[in-house]
Image (tube, coloured by chain):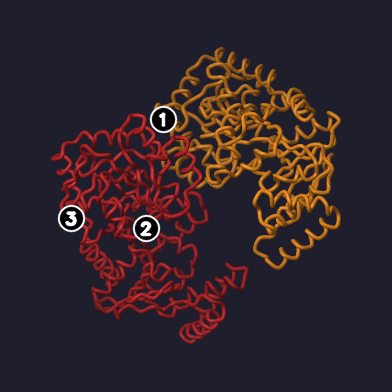
C-alpha cells in the first residue's frame, strides 16, 4: 500500500455527523485521502469529490432491496463471510426488522472493505461486533467522553464488550490523556493510543484579549446541553453563594432541551429567578457573540472529554473557570491561563469568582493572553489535521 | 359514611400510609371505595371495593376513539342527569364541549356512585376530576404529598386553581407542606389537619445492640434513585470521611432513573469498594438491612415527611437528615437525630464524624428518646383516630 493511496472510512453512523467529525472529514479530504462514509443520511452535504457516501436507506422497502443487493455482492466476494454474518446477526436479533436493519448497516462496509475503518463512537463495537470479526481493515477507535468515562460503569455488558474488543483494535484516538488512561482499564494498549486534542476555528483567534470586568455586573456564562454530567446543579449552588455574598452578577445557561425539574426546583428554592437566565440553544455565530460579551465562562461539569466551549472562550479572551474533570487539566493551569477547581465543589468556584474579581486589568490580560497562546500552540485546526493525517499514514503503512 | 378514595395505584407494600388509612376507616365503621387507574391487569384481593377508570390508550387512535364513545354512551345511559351536570360544570369553568366529554370519560367510574365524601390521595390525582364531587353531591377533600406541592406546580403554574375552589378541607403530612400550598394559592380559610405518616411499631423493633457501631461503620439510605434525594451529596460527604481515615460501608436501597449518575459519583470519588447498590428489595429485607446498620442518612433536597426516617428512628439507628422542611419536622435536631445543611457535603460529614466519635451511652440515649417519640406521636392508632376524625367532621 503506498502512503497516499488508501481509503479511510470515518464511521459515526450519521451523515452528516457532529462538528468534530465533520471537521475531520473536511481536513482529511483536503489532504487528498479517499474517504468513505456509511450510515443514515440525515441531509445533503457537499463534500469534495474524494469523499464517497454509501448511505443505508431507512424506509422499509428500499432497505430490504438494499440488503438483498449488498448480500448478493458479498455472496460472490466471500460466501463464507456472508454466512457467518447472517448467523451472528440472526442470533442477536429476535425481530426481522432489526435483523434487516443491522444487515443494512454492516453489509456495505464489508463490501467496500476500506483500508482503515475508523469508529467514532466506541459503543459501535458492542452494537455491531461483526465488524471486528469479519472486517479485514485496520480498525481505529476514537475514545470520547461518556462512552468511556461512565457508560460502561453502569452497563456490565458494554464493559465486557470493551474488554473483549479493545485488545484487538489497531489504533486508538483519544481526545485527552485522561480518557486514554481510562480506556486502558478496558484493555486498550497504551502504545496504540494517540492523543489528538480537539481544536477551535482559526477565526476565533483574531481580535484582542483584554477583558474588562471592574465596575460592571459580572456576566457569567455556561454552555452545554442539559444533562447531569454538566453539573448545572452545582453551578446554581455557586450562584446561591454569590447572591448571599452580595456580588452583583448574572448567570446565563445556554442549553438545549427541556429544563430539568431539578434545575427549575433549585432556581426556585434559591430564589434566583432574577439572577439566572436559561437560553435554549443558540446558533454558532450568536453563541460566539454571547461568549465574547460575557466576563467569565464557567464549566461546572462532573465529566467531560475536553469541553470545546472552554477552548473557544480561551481563544476569544474570556477568562475561564473549570472543574478538574476529564482532560480539562490538560488545557487549564490554575491562575496561569484560567482557574481550575475540584469537581463537585461549588464553594471553590465561588472563591475563584472572588479571586477573578480581585485581579487587576493587567493581571487579567496576562491570563487571557496565556490562554490564547495555549490554544494557538496546542489546539489549532491545522495542527489537529496534521496529527490525524500522520495517525492514518502510520496505521496504513504498519 | 360512604367514602370514596381516589388513588393513582392500589397501595403497594411500600405505601403503608394508604393501606393503614383504608384499614382504619373500615374499622371505624365507614364504607370505603377506592377509585384508581392503575393495576387494572392484576386485580388484587382486597377487603374494600375497587373501581377502575376506563383505559386511556395512547398511540392507538382508532381503539381509543371506539373506547371513548362506548364509555361516554354507557355512562350517559346509566346516569344521564349526572353527565349533563358534569358537562355544564365543566363548561362553566371554560372547558369546551370536547374537553367536558373527556372529563366524563375520565370520571365515568366515579359518576355512578353515591358518596358522602370523595377524597383524593394526591393533589395531582384531582386534576380533571375537580367537578366530579359536586356532580354526585359529595363533599371533596385532598391529601398533599411532597411531589404535588414541591415539584409539579413549578412546571405547571396555576394547576390547582380549580381544585382550591372545590375542596372543603385538606390533609397535610407536615406543617411546611401546608404553608407551601398556601404560597401557591390554597386559601387560608380552608381548614386543614396535619396527620403525619405512621408506622407499625411491631414491625420495626428497637435494636438490642443500638448505639454499638460496627467496624467499619455501616450507613444506609432507603429511597428511589431520584435527583430529589440528592445522593451525590451523600457520596461527597462520605468522600470526606474517607479522607479523614474513617472506614465505612454505605448501602443504598432502591432503584430509579439516576443509577448511572450516582454510580459515576461513587466511582469518581474512589468509593467503589465501600458503597453498595442493593436495588429494590422486599420490605422484610429492608428491615434486615436496617437492623444491620448503624447510621441512617437522608440527604434529600425536599421531602413531604419521609417514612423511612421514621422507621430508622423507631429501630434505634442514628439518623442524619437534611434540613429540608419535611425532615426537620421528622427529626428533632440533637435530640432524636441530627440535621445537616442540604447540598453541603461538609455539613453532613461533620455530623457523621460527630456521631461516629460519640460514646455508646450517648448514642443509646438518643436512640431511646427517638423511639419514645415515634411511639407517642407516630403510631398507627393515633393516625387512625385522626383520620376518622378528619372524615367525620
Would you call the spot at circle 1 few (<14 residues within 10 Å), some (14-19), or many (20 or more)? Answer: some
Judging depth in this view, the residue of A108 and B103 nearest the camera is B103
Q: Which mark is residue A119?
A: none
Q: Do marks 1 and 2 share a subunit? A: no
Instruction: Please provide percent x and percent y for residue A126.
Output: 48, 62
**Within the image, what quadrant is residue B16 found in?**
top right
Would you call the spot at circle 2 few (<14 residues within 10 Å), some (14-19), or many (20 or more)? Answer: many
Instruction: Please provide percent x and percent y for residue B7.
Output: 72, 43
- Please report the residue visible at 48 percent of the width from the left and 43 percent of the height from the top: A264
Q: Assign the C terminus of chain B to one quadrant of the image.
A: top right
Residue tagged 2? A143
Q: Do marks 3 and 1 share a subunit? A: no
Would you call the spot at circle 3 few (<14 residues within 10 Å), some (14-19), or many (20 or more)? Answer: few
Q: Which mark is residue B240?
A: 1
Residue tagged 3? A377
Colour displayed for chain A in the image of the structure: red
User: What is the letter of the orange chain?
Assistant: B
The secondary element bearing badge 1 is classed as helix
Residue B392 as seen in the image, left or right of residue B162: right
Judging depth in this view, the residue of B297 and A44 nearest the camera is A44
**Within the image, what quadrant is residue A86 found in?**
bottom right
Instruction: Please provide percent x and percent y for residue B40.
Output: 76, 52
Given the image, what chain letter belongs to the residue carrying mark 2? A
Amino acid at each position: 500500500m503506498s502512503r497516499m493511496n488508501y481509503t479511510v472510512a470515518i464511521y459515526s453512523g450519521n451523515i452528516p455527523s457532529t462538528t468534530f467529525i465533520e471537521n475531520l472529514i473536511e481536513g482529511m479530504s483536503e489532504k487528498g485521502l479517499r474517504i468513505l462514509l456509511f450510515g443514515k443520511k440525515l441531509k445533503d452535504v457537499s463534500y469534495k469529490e474524494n469523499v464517497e457516501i454509501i448511505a443505508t436507506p431507512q424506509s422499509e422497502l428500499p432497505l430490504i432491496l438494499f440488503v438483498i443487493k449488498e448480500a448478493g455482492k458479498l455472496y460472490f466476494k466471500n460466501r463464507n463471510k456472508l454466512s457467518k454474518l447472517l448467523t451472528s446477526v440472526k442470533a442477536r436479533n429476535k425481530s426481522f426488522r432489526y435483523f434487516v436493519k443491522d444487515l443494512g448497516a454492516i453489509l456495505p462496509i464489508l463490501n467496500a472493505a476500506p483500508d482503515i475503518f475508523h469508529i467514532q463512537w466506541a459503543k459501535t463495537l458492542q452494537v455491531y461486533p461483526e465488524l471486528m470479526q469479519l472486517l479485514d481493515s485496520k480498525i481505529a477507535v476514537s475514545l470520547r467522553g461518556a462512552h468511556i468515562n461512565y457508560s460502561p460503569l453502569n452497563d456490565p455488558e458494554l464493559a465486557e464488550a470493551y474488554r473483549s474488543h479493545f485488545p484487538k483494535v489497531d489504533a486508538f484516538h483519544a481526545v485527552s490523556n485522561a480518557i486514554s488512561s481510562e480506556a486502558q482499564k478496558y484493555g486498550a494498549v497504551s502504545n496504540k493510543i494517540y492523543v489528538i486534542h480537539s481544536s477551535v476555528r482559526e477565526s476565533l483567534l483574531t481580535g484582542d484579549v483584554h477583558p474588562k470586568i471592574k465596575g460592571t455586573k459580572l456576566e457569567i456564562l455556561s454552555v452545554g446541553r442539559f444533562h447531569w454530567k454538566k453539573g448545572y446543579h452545582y453551578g446554581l449552588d455557586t450562584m446561591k453563594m454569590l447572591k448571599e455574598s452580595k456580588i452583583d452578577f448574572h448567570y446565563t445557561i445556554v442549553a438545549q432541551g427541556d429544563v430539568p425539574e431539578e434545575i427549575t426546583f433549585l432556581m426556585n428554592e434559591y430564589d434566583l429567578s432574577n439572577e439566572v437566565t436559561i437560553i435554549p440553544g443558540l446558533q454558532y455565530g450568536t453563541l460566539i457573540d454571547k461568549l465574547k460579551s460575557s466576563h467569565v465562562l464557567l464549566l461546572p461539569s462532573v465529566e467531560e472529554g475536553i469541553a470545546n466551549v472552554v477552548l473557544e472562550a480561551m481563544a476569544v479572551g474570556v477568562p475561564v473557570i473549570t472543574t478538574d474533570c476529564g482532560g480539562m487539566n490538560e488545557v487549564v493551569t490554575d491562575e496561569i491561563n484560567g482557574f481550575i477547581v475540584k469537581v463537585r465543589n461549588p464553594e471553590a468556584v465561588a472563591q475563584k469568582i472572588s479571586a477573578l474579581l480581585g485581579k487587576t486589568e493587567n493581571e487579567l490580560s496576562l491570563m487571557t493572553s496565556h490562554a490564547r497562546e495555549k490554544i494557538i500552540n496546542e489546539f489549532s485546526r491545522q495542527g489537529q489535521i496534521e496529527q490525524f493525517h500522520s495517525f492514518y499514514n502510520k496505521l496504513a503503512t504498519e | 359514611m360512604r367514602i370514596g378514595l381516589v388513588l393513582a395505584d392500589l397501595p403497594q407494600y411500600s405505601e403503608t400510609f394508604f393501606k393503614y388509612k383504608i384499614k382504619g376507616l373500615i374499622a371505624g365503621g365507614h364504607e370505603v371505595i377506592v377509585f384508581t387507574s392503575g393495576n387494572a391487569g392484576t386485580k388484587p384481593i382486597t377487603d374494600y371495593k375497587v373501581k377502575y377508570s376506563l383505559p386511556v390508550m395512547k398511540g392507538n387512535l382508532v381503539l381509543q376513539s371506539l373506547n371513548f364513545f362506548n364509555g361516554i354512551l354507557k355512562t350517559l345511559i346509566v346516569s344521564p342527569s349526572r353527565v349533563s351536570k358534569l358537562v355544564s360544570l365543566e363548561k362553566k369553568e371554560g372547558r369546551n364541549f370536547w374537553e367536558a366529554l373527556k372529563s366524563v370519560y375520565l370520571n365515568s367510574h366515579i359518576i355512578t356512585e353515591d358518596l358522602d365524601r370523595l377524597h383524593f390521595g394526591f393533589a395531582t390525582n384531582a386534576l380533571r376530576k375537580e367537578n366530579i364531587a359536586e356532580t354526585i353531591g359529595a363533599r371533596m377533600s385532598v391529601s398533599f404529598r411532597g411531589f404535588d406541592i414541591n415539584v409539579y406546580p413549578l412546571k405547571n403554574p396555576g394547576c390547582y386553581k380549580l381544585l382550591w375552589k372545590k375542596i372543603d378541607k385538606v390533609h397535610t403530612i407536615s406543617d411546611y407542606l401546608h404553608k407551601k400550598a398556601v404560597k401557591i394559592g390554597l386559601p387560608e380559610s380552608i381548614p386543614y389537619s396535619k396527620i403525619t405518616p405512621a408506622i407499625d411499631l411491631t414491625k420495626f423493633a428497637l435494636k438490642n445492640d443500638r448505639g454499638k457501631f460496627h467496624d467499619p461503620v455501616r450507613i444506609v439510605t432507603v429511597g428511589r434513585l431520584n435527583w430529589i434525594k440528592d445522593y451525590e451529596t451523600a457520596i461527597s460527604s462520605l468522600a470526606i470521611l474517607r479522607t479523614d481515615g474513617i472506614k465505612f460501608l454505605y448501602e443504598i436501597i432502591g432503584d430509579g432513573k439516576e443509577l448511572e449518575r450516582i454510580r459515576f459519583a461513587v466511582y469518581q470519588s474512589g468509593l467503589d469498594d465501600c458503597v453498595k447498590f442493593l436495588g429494590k428489595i422486599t420490605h422484610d429485607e429492608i428491615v434486615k438491612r436496617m437492623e444491620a446498620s448503624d447510621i441512617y442518612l437522608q440527604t434529600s433536597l425536599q421531602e413531604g415527611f419521609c417514612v423511612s426516617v421514621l422507621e430508622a428512628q423507631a429501630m434505634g439507628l442514628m439518623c442524619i437528615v437534611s434540613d429540608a422542611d419535611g425532615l426537620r419536622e421528622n427529626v428533632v435536631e440533637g435530640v432524636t437525630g441530627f440535621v445537616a445543611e442540604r447540598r453541603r457535603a461538609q455539613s453532613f460529614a461533620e455530623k457523621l464524624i460527630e456521631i461516629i466519635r460519640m460514646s455508646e451511652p450517648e448514642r443509646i440515649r438518643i436512640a431511646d428518646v427517638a423511639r419514645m417519640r415515634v411511639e407517642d406521636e407516630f403510631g398507627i392508632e393515633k393516625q387512625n383516630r385522626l383520620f376518622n376524625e378528619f372524615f367525620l367532621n
